[in-house]
Image (cartoon, rainbow, N blue to C red):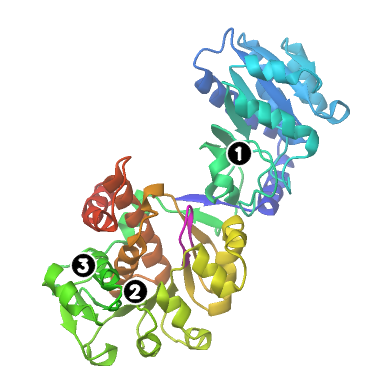
Amino acid sequence: MRTAYSVETVRTAERELMARLPEGALMRRAAAGLAAACADVLGRVYGSRVVLLVGSGDNGGDALHAGARLARRGAGVSAVLLAPERAHAGGLAALRRAGGRTTGTDGADGLIERADLVVDGIVGIGGKGGLRPEAVPLADAAGRARAAVVAVDLPSGVDADTGEVRGAALRADLTVTFGTHKPGLLIDPAREYAGSVRLVDIGLSLPEEPEAEALQHADVARLLPVPAVESDKYRRGVVGIAAGSARYPGAAVLAVAGALRGGAGAVRYVGPAGQAVIARFPETLVSDGGPKRAGRVQAWVVGPGAGDDAATVAEVLAADVPVLIDADGLRLAEASAVRGRRAPTLMTPHAGEAAALLGVEREEVEGGRLGAVRELAGRYGATVLLKGSTTLIAPPGGGAVRVNPTGTSWLATAGSGDVLSGLAGSLLAAGLSAVDAASAGAYLHGLAGRFAADGAPMGAHDVAEGIAGAWRSVVRG
């Protein structure tokens, strides 16, 4: 599992560690890891041209010390100092002793244009609000250059704690981060600026609970249900799907498709799309008497393609089992009914639906995804899975937000969310908690999307078909 901690937590851990180490030792650890990563990017260090973009803080000091190491290996290293009078003194001395050069911002464009590697040491993890005006031309020049760009700890101009980008920022091909990931390296839009991320261990002691965490194959494999020898379809869990309408029967079919591949032993369907469901999936238990007469279930999924059927949504919310609410169900569900539920509730909005629930513009949710998912979880007393370029899962009582690392932009296709709802609902019925069902469901769904797309367009039904392969990939490691 990859974990991410807030700037305040990282700063506290750094201070505690520095108190036990010789002066400058922590920066030298970071610089050694940064220099090694830069050397890997360059391939051949001797004779290469490296440009350091150096701000006034320790971030710039890391860049200078790393540049000194590269210079000692034969690279031609030039440091562009944005604030010469406030540049890290020890780092400057080390670079100059190694034969590196320093310059101001005038004429820096030419240096960057000829560089093989640009190191972004402009702003550290405490930066807020985008790049300052004097740094923007350097970021633009780095973006135009053929050189690879390596960011020190975090791309300059992005918010480490939230993943927000409120102004100009520098895009990196690789970010070398120290001690731990920062939330902004996992969460869009900042994640998009980070490129690949390489973690350098510098010996920090961090709390048990992070701000954010991203599951990996082994973590998901431990969550997935495995039938016991004595299991039957009912012991494995039964998920109810209340979805679809005369206008949107396909939503019901796709939700059932996801549910059938999600680990539960049986799927019960209620709604007006029964004929379409049974024609595609004859193993589905179809009922036309509404949720209360469908038979026993261990979890419900309600909302995909439901149109204006508020009565069915209310009936499902009154059930004393876990409920996943998606799509039209999010619009139709009474907030008080969601908050008043005793059994777990999982809400799965995309950015537009989240914006409607919060009463804000969609752009506000997309630019501040972490704040939005936490606000929704707290407001509704529910686990919230916020879909999008970064899928986030927030528990209702606070704590670590899960970040899904799988997926592909090809998943932005009609019906893909219906498949996810069925899949996560099936995992709820199989006994997973709301957070774990959302996390494992999003992980498998994203992986299935990757497998199905393979670099080309695909449909939601392809995603459903890819779930089995994704499941096997996870459990086999």
Q: Which residues are magenta?
A: 385-392
**Residue 268 covered by magenta stretch:** no
Q: Quadrant of residue 360?
A: bottom right
Query: Who's the residue at 16% across and 79% down the image?
Result: 285
Nearer to us in this view, 16 or 245: 245
Cα separation, mark 3 vs mark 2, equals 18 Å
Q: What amino acid type is highlighted by mark number 1?
A: Phe
Q: Residue furthest front?
A: 247
Q: Determine which residue is flagged by label 3.
A: 260
Cα separation, mark 3 vs mark 1, equals 43 Å
Q: Are marks 3 and 2 in contact (CB under 8 Å)?
A: no
The answer to whether residue 239 shows anywhere in this view is yes
Q: What amino acid type is highlighted by mark number 3?
A: Leu
Q: Determine which residue is flagged by label 2.
A: 305
The answer to whether residue 398 shows anywhere in this view is no
Query: Who's the residue at 25% across and 56% down the image?
Result: 467
Q: Determine which residue is flagged by label 1.
A: 178
